[in-house]
Amino acid sequence: MTIFRRIPSLLVLILVGIGATSLQSPADDPPVQPNIPKSKTSDDLPSTKALVRGNTRLALDLLRSLRDDGNLFFSPIGVSEALAICFEGARGATASQMAHVLGFPEGGSRLGERFQILRQAGVNLNSDDVTFKSANGLWSQLPLKSDFENDVRDDFDAEVFEVDFASPASREEIRRWVRTQTDGAAELPAESLSDPLLRLLVINTILFKAAWAQQFDSDFTSNKPFELMDGTSRDVPTMRQKGVFRYGTWDDLEVLELPYAGGGASAFILLPARSDSESDESAGAVSPLERLEDTLTAAELDGRLSALSPKHLKIYLPRFSITSNLSLGELLRGLGMSLPFQSGADFSGITDADELNIDEVLQDARIDFDEGGTEAAVVTVVTVTGRGISQKPPPPPPVFKVDRPFMFLVRENTTGSILFMGRVTEPIEDRAGHD
């Protein structure tokens, strides 16, 4: 798979650059694929709408905050759900800051039930061609308040464990739990158990494997130029096919939907328009991908995705794989969630045995994107410490050609919940193990 240097995850919505050129050898074109059904959508779940809107806003905030010149992949819903478990025990200004930054509905009313609906929507994707698994776990070295423990078990379907974090056997049990929940596709981030003052550990895992509704034929994959962020180009393995896909084009952007088998989830490629002039690409200038990331709002993203319509297209799309190892605490503080990380945080709804604060939010994420479909595995960890911790044929069809930096995401279509998001600035193939 082609790898992008960096991808801000979020599920898999993919933002990709697209060009309007045709293949040089029409005789080598892949066969035209049959029409595909429009992805399933529903407005029948009003209780999740505010949560999904908030998660989309968080996804874009994290995408901008994590930006550099490389590939990125992350899961906004993984961050949101892991922190939502902590939010159940937050009080006062601590809870207010978390709700604002994470986009939780005002007051956080029935938050766990709303996440339960999103999880069930993911479970409903499962079929012979799609695997979706999501799990929550909480390990505590302190006695938990019964209301908090019951809410975490009932509303978040979380397993709750008493643990001695200093015990090698306990540490190995936690690592084994992560491997089991992800079918061996992910490991616990190494930094998760490093703090001697660790009191509470919250883990969310997501495993997603899905075949395309219209798979690409690997016989038609060949090296094609991909324009890098610095204006140079590099030949990368590029898939291609012709068919009818939901598509939209605007002055600044092209968007393509690639549904997975069953239509319950889709990948979306967002391809910024090319720069109008050489001055736009001069040293220090904002690239088309950066401009898109800077200006795209949650409402605009939803509007563009909703406006897509079926069109007969010829598609060029690079394969890619991305691995990201992220520490999100500083970014979340910068977004306005500083109090939960401070020694004065109020998580009194969790326990009376110690004064707690969040120490770090870690996420290890991996995605493979190829001719057959998509595989993604994500582990999100919230480490919570005790008092005193420091803060840390007819005419040729139009062409959708992803040959320059783009953005992507994966979305569960019934609720609109973004599972993964990322960016690709240089497709790279790296099928090595998790570092």
Image: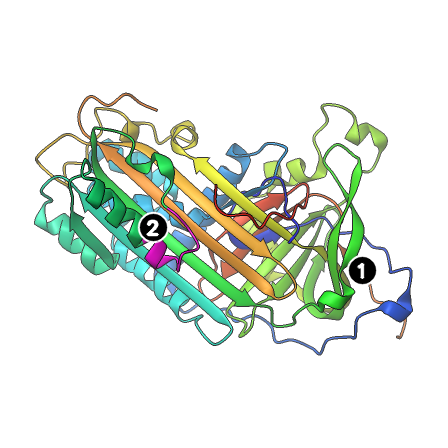
Between tags 2 and 1, which lies in front? 2
Indicate the position of residue 382 as horizontal and vertical percent values. 31, 40
Q: Residue furthest bottom?
A: 34
Secondary structure category for the residue under label 2: strand
From this view, report whether residue 55 is shown above or below residue 283.
below
Q: Which residue is mark 2?
A: 204
Compare residues 334 and 14 and report the one nearer the observer.
Answer: 14
Q: Is residue 124 magenta?
A: no
Q: Residue furthest front?
A: 168
Q: Which quadrant holds residue 261?
A: bottom right
Q: Measuring 63% from the left and 33% from the top, which residue is drawn there?
A: 69
Specify which label sits upstream in the sequence, 2 or 1.
2
Secondary structure category for the residue under label 1: strand
Asked whether residue 111 appears in the rendered view, the answer is no
| Residue type pointed to by label 1 | Val
From this view, report whether residue 206 is shown above or below residue 262.
above
Indicate the position of residue 378 as horizontal and vertical percent values. 43, 50
| Residue type pointed to by label 2 | Asn
Q: Which residues are magenta?
A: 178-187
Compare residues 168 and 83 and report the one nearer the observer.
Answer: 168
Which secondary structure class fits the magenta region best? loop
Q: Which residue is mark 1?
A: 399
Q: CA distance from mark 2 to mark 1?
A: 39 Å
Q: Measuring 75% from the left and 63% from the top, which residue is drawn there?
A: 240
Indicate the position of residue 47 as horizontal and vertical percent values. 34, 60
